[in-house]
Amino acid sequence: MKHFVGLDVALKETAICVVDEAGKIIGEGKVLSEPEAIMAWLTPLDLFIGKVGLEIGGLARWLHDQLRAAGLPAVCIDPRRLRGLTKTMPVKTDRNDARAIAQVMRVGWYRAVHVKSEASQELRMLLTNRKTLLTKQIDIENEVRGTLRVFGLKLIGRVTQASFERRALELVAAAPRLAAMVRPMLAARAALRQQCAVLHQMMLDVARRSSTCRRLMTVPGVGALTAVTYLTTIDDPGRFQHSRDLGPHLGLTPRKYASGEVDRNGAISKSGDAPLRATLYQAALALLTRTQRWSTLKAWGIAIARRRGLRRAVVAVARKLAIVLHRIWVDGSEFCWSRQEAVV
């Protein structure tokens, strides 16, 4: 008889529930969130385990890999579908969540989530750290601007990243007390800028070494950041049977509500990976507004912009970019600027 295990993972402890094929609870417990502790709890039961389910996120990816390496059929599941079940619970606890996960693994009412490779997770960490340093740098710049504005000192006009510190010090040169308070902020900004440049160079090196990234960058509007973000988010292009599946996966297709006589389409679902969706949006905007060379893709986007407006056109081109990038990755080809070029 098969048995099914549900794991509700927290930072410190993990709740475990084991059920049989009939849904009867065989055992429950709570152990440290370590693969060795989970294996030590399950091994004495001496059961044939069909599946081990845990929600994606936090420690789940690491535990998933470790449990599979130990021989357990671990599966990471989408928490959004499970949320529809757990939100009806009058009493929601880790124990009840583990019970719910075990039951959905038994009946198959779950959607498995792709667990990225270690290389892709390292790239995502690189991009996330770079974005964090860049965001903190911008926060400091805005804080300095706002502080000086209170005293009538305005950082106006074209202020580049390189000239920001010099312009700020020039404004406070006649106010020693203000200068003493601004200099630590500028020093922190300089350190953030320096370390952000280090991570940015690491990202450029990844794009330079990867043949896939170089081919993705043949698409107009797609630079190193977009290519590396696409690479680490998709991870394995073979998990998508059709390139058109990338649109719904990244939340770039409209929501739909149909019931009775009501049938309406809404805004895009935004249900996929937010960083990649934002990056593709920026790439599509650059393609439509900054790329000088014409292509079939740009002509298609401009036609939509004339009919429906620029914002809708950018979203449509972003979805199309996701599809084109996937085909380039799978086929080992490069971007075709015209239909004639594709035929040749």
Image (spheres, rainbow, N blue to C red):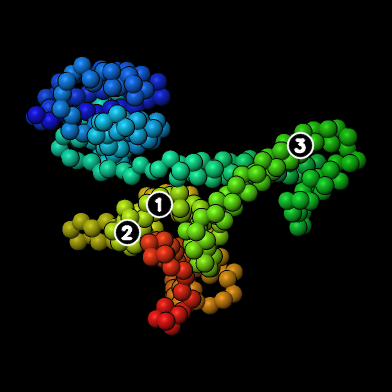
User: Disc 3 marks which amino acid?
Assistant: Ala
Q: Which residue in the protein does label 1 denote? A: 234
**Looking at the picture, how far across and down is residue 219, in whole percent?**
50, 67
Q: Residue at x 59, y 52 (%)?
A: 204
**Looking at the picture, how far across and down is residue 209, in whole percent?**
54, 54
Nearer to us in this view, 329 or 14: 329
In front: label 1 or label 3: 1
Q: Secondary structure at mark 2?
A: helix
Label 1 crowd bin: few (<14), some (14–19), many (20+), radius 10 Å: some
User: Which quadrant of the view contains residue 53?
Assistant: top left
Q: Residue at x 79, y 33 (%)?
A: 181
User: Which quadrant of the view contains residue 38?
Assistant: top left
User: Disc 2 marks which amino acid?
Assistant: Asp
Q: Residue at x 17, y 40 (%)?
A: 108
Judge left or right: residue 125 versus residue 190.
left
Distance between the alpha carbons at the discs numbered 1 and 2: 12 Å
User: Disc 1 marks which amino acid?
Assistant: Ile
In front: label 1 or label 2: 1
Q: Earlier in the sequence, mark 1 or mark 3?
A: 3
Give the vertical position of 308 relative to 165 (above or below).
Answer: below
Q: Which residue in the protein does label 3 denote? A: 187
Q: Earlier in the sequence, mark 1 or mark 2?
A: 1
Q: Quadrant of the N terminus?
A: top left
Judge left or right: residue 213 versus residue 89.
right
Q: Quadrant of the C terminus?
A: bottom left
Asked whether disc 2 touches disc 3, contact meaning CB atoms under 8 Å apart, the reply is no
**Looking at the picture, how far across and down is residue 52, in whole percent?**
24, 31
Q: Which residue in the protein does label 2 denote? A: 245
Q: Secondary structure at mark 3?
A: helix
Q: Earlier in the sequence, mark 2 or mark 3?
A: 3
Q: Secondary structure at mark 1?
A: helix
**Looking at the picture, how far across and down is residue 304, in whole percent?**
44, 73
